[in-house]
Image (cartoon, rainbow, N blue to C red):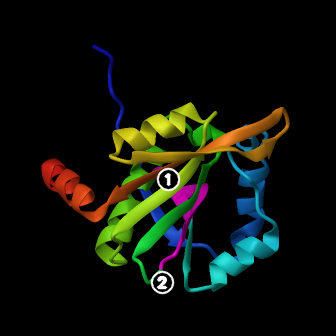
Amino acid sequence: MADIKPSPPIRLRPTMLSDLDFVLSVEQDPLNLPFITPWERIQHEGAVRFPDFRHFIVEAGADYASAGFVILQGCRNPHHSIELKRLVLLPAMHGIGIGRSCLRWLAQMAFRDLGAHRFWLDVKALNLPAQALYRSEGFVEEGRLRESVKTADGYDSLIVMSMLADEYARRAEAAGR
């Protein structure tokens, strides 16, 4: 049986405008670019300032060093449908449980703190590790936007996934969260 290491501790702190060089560098990392559609600085500035968004720096490890960033959108949506717009980590942080920890924090924030009825996201079809993570955390595929994003090699599809409040509540109760 393989040893399972616990993921490093994480925390989310609101992004400051002074963090945007870090945010842009994480987005522009060649290992992250195939999986996201990067934003301009002005888009991130808007997300930091506009109350419909929550833009956070992910800090991880014993020293809580910056490990990535996340964005929620639709925090004031009248239909209580909040989107996980972005979850991007430094490549060195991939595969060690930080993404899963972030996803759990964000789901709790969406459902418990922001009163979401639906928490949703889209993920590129080529991003199989992210899809597996989202499924393992209870997200359900709703559909595909076929060949909807241009890539260096042609086009990729977006898979729309979501979790509803009652599904989250059952999972949280079963996990003792």
Does the image show residue 96?
no
Q: Report how far apart the C-alphas of labels 1 and 2 lie in the structure.
A: 28 Å
Q: Nearer the viewer, residue 135 or 59?
A: 135
Kind of element beneath mark 1: strand
Above or below, 122 against 155 in this view is below
Q: Position of residue 122 (x, y in %)?
A: 56, 52
- Sequence-earlier tag: 1 or 2: 1
Q: Magenta span covers which residues?
A: 57-75
Residue positioned 33% across, 17% down in the render: 2
Question: Residue flagged by tag 1: what amino acid is it?
Answer: Ala
Determine the image quadrant of residue 114. bottom left
> Can you identify the residue that label 1 sits on?
60
- Asked if the residues shown at circle 1 and circle 2 are in contact, with their CB atoms under 8 angstroms apart, the answer is no
Q: Is residue 126 visible?
A: yes
Please state the horizontal and vertical placement of residue 93, each as a whole percent of the image: 57, 41
**Dot 2: element:** loop
